[in-house]
Amino acid sequence: MAIRNIVKLGEDDAVLHKRARKVEKFDARLHELLADMAETMYAADGAGLAAPQVGVLKRAVVIDVGEGLIELVNPEIVSTEGEVTVIEGCLSVPGRSGKVVRPEKATVRGLNRDGEEVEITGEGMLAVCLCHEIDHLDGIVYVDKMIEDVSDQYEFAKREEQA
């Protein structure tokens, strides 16, 4: 396993705006990619990471919102319910945060690292994270959907919390 470099918006970031390719081979290279992505996500204190964020145009994501690691390959959103406005950040957009409208509940179907079908229904933070990471696979970064930049407000609140 290895920590990979995270592609940052504004720094050789063309990969962040391209649609990732479907994974066809479920082999040791994919397993290594998923392991590296998880290690990278944890090292950066993130809740999710998509393969394009580490420069790999494959449809693979890792997520952990505190309920354990989720690995999804070729994920697709099959249904959503409700709507919520949340404040998001992104490992590829450090130092910024913004309001984004996301589903309250999302059901995603994909494959695990061995090519077996899985279906996950997430609510709250998990639903947001599923949608955020799948957006990355379609070349969409949350700032493309952001309805309000709250970076300054969020940083002020964090400083107040730490004081």
Image (tube, rainbow, N blue to C red):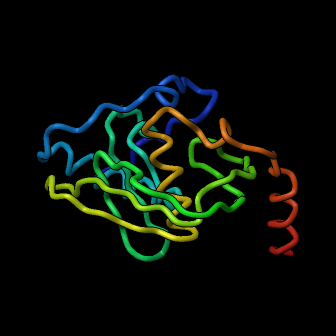
Residue 30 point in image, percent of width and height: 21, 45
Q: Is residue 131 left or right of residue 109?
A: right
Residue 45 in sight from this viewpoint: no
Name the residue: 33% across, 40% down: 59
**Image spot of residue 133 (x, y percent):** 48, 49
Q: Position of residue 162 (x, y in %)?
A: 81, 74
* Residue drawn at (74%, 50%) of the image: 98
| Residue occupying the point 36% across, 66% down | 120
How far from the left and from the top, in percent, is residue 125? 56, 67
Left or right: residue 30 compared with residue 20:
left
Q: Residue 50, relative to residue 80: is it above or below? A: above
93 sits left or right of 54 in the view: right
User: As displayed, is residue 128 above or below residue 94?
Assistant: below
Q: Could you tell me which quadrant the C terminus lies in? A: bottom right
Q: Nearer the viewer, residue 107 or 97?
A: 107
Which one is in front, 159 or 31? 31
Residue plotted at (73% across, 51% down): 97
Q: Residue 113 appears in which quarter of the rendering?
A: bottom left
The tally of labels here is 0
Whether 116 is drawn above or below 15: the answer is: below
Would residue 32 be visible to someone looking at this image?
A: yes
